[in-house]
Amino acid sequence: MEEIRVTLGCIGIFLFMDKICQIKTTRNKKLLMLSAGVLFLSVSFFCLPGGAGISAVIMPGLELIVALLLFQTDCWHCCAGFLFSLSYYTVIYYPIKLVIFSTGIAHKELKQIFTELITIVLIIIIGKLIRKNDNLVNNIRKARSRFLFIAGLCGFLDNGIVFFVDYFTQGMEGRGITAVKILNAIVNVFVYFLGLLIIYIDIIRQGIQEENAIKDKYLQISKEHFQEISDHMQEVRRIKHDMKSHTSSLEHYLTNQKYSDALAYLNRMKDTRILDVQVMNLVGNQMVDAVIFHALGGHKGIRIQCEGVLPSDLNVSDYDLCTIFSNMVSNAAEACEKLKKSEKLIEIKLGCYQGNIVIAVCNPVEWEIDVDRLGRITSKEEKQGHGYGIYNIKNTVERLGGKYFFDVAERVFEVKIILNMQGEILC
């Protein structure tokens, strides 16, 4: 019975790492078999005379080896996640233990097994609830190794306090002992909360640093775009200045029926980019325009057209608008790069309706898209691809109280966003 309890406890800790700490497990069958073998080896010590004492010493080390085999992350993060899970597993385990041990079940080992089973079920339920919130999953995965390690040490410190208090107050009764246990409970809650607070503060700090880095990037993009606009205006002025002489030359060739010379002159004008004048204004917001052109910068042969402009009284920050447009246009451009037959065209449609701004970006597709799965981040690799861009759009729109829609019709993929112009939450 003891072997079963210990095995369930180990499984519970690994489930804690997977479901709550959101550390991805391996899919390699050989590693799964090897980790199961190491776990079986550690539990097997209980079958030997005096094995329980030996296993109590080596069990944490063997469990750590299993974790290193089982989880797809670097060694240091795996060790920190294991220490955190080992410490905070008791936060779920001990309340259940108090309830189970207060029941009328006579067999102590049976109570312990029930406690482990209920703890495992509760961890799985908590994991499913976490997975339903993409923003929560993303924030949990931002937890850095050193802060997980510090929080895990806080948990071990708390477990040590519990052990010493229980040891020195064993068999003692009275108001003083009750007061000590109440104080011990308060300290337990404080220490565990302190560990979680350390991780939370670091995640918030990372978010602020990322936001500042993105704002600096948008500012730099805007500066470059403004310089391009300045160069563009200089080019327009130069063309306007030279246009009279160009038209006079063409008129001379045409009047004298020198059509080949006129055509050659026009070709020279094309070669010197005299007729290559691009539209630098798209949505009526210079910073957003800059971000859109930057998103298209690395993609060749993609045509973009825009209907409508952003209203001047839109109560949405430039930062949020840049985040939305940057991700929408980047995703559309990446999709256009994969096209083999369809025209590489991105359409931006803007319109106002009943106090709301509607933003739609469309691009052709030549493959099937599961709209329901868009934006679900399931691995670190997806964060660097298309899925993370959709996630950024969803997260920003939700924070602004808006609505988003994804649709595929007649081989055209459309992302549509609705925001209240005064920043109010849409029902």
Image (tube, rainbow, N blue to C red):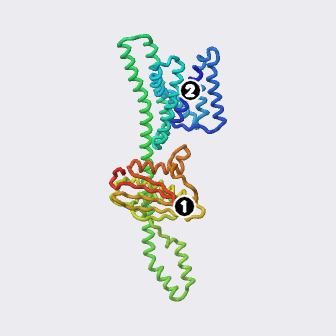
Q: Quadrant of the N terminus?
A: top right
- Is 129 left or right of 49, judged from the image as shown? left
Q: Which mark is residue 411?
A: 1
- Is 43 left or right of 409, judged from the image as shown? right
Q: Does the CB distance between marks 2 and 1 fall below 8 Å?
A: no
Seen from the viewer's position, the closer of residues 371 and 280 is: 371
Is the residue marked by circle 2 packed among few (<14), some (14-19), or many (20+) residues within 10 Å? many
Q: Which mark is residue 13?
A: none
Residue bearing mark 2: 8
Q: Secondary structure at mark 1?
A: loop
Task: Name the residue rendered at 35%, 13% in the picture.
Answer: 175
Distance (Cα) linking label 2 and label 1: 50 Å
Say if residue 142 shows up in the picture: no
Quadrant of residue 279 within the rendered picture: bottom left
Q: Measured from the top left, where is residue 342 in percent x and y?
A: 57, 64
Task: Name the residue rendered at 63%, 30% in the picture.
Answer: 36
Quadrant of residue 367 within the rendered picture: bottom right
Seen from the viewer's position, the closer of residues 297 and 425 is: 425
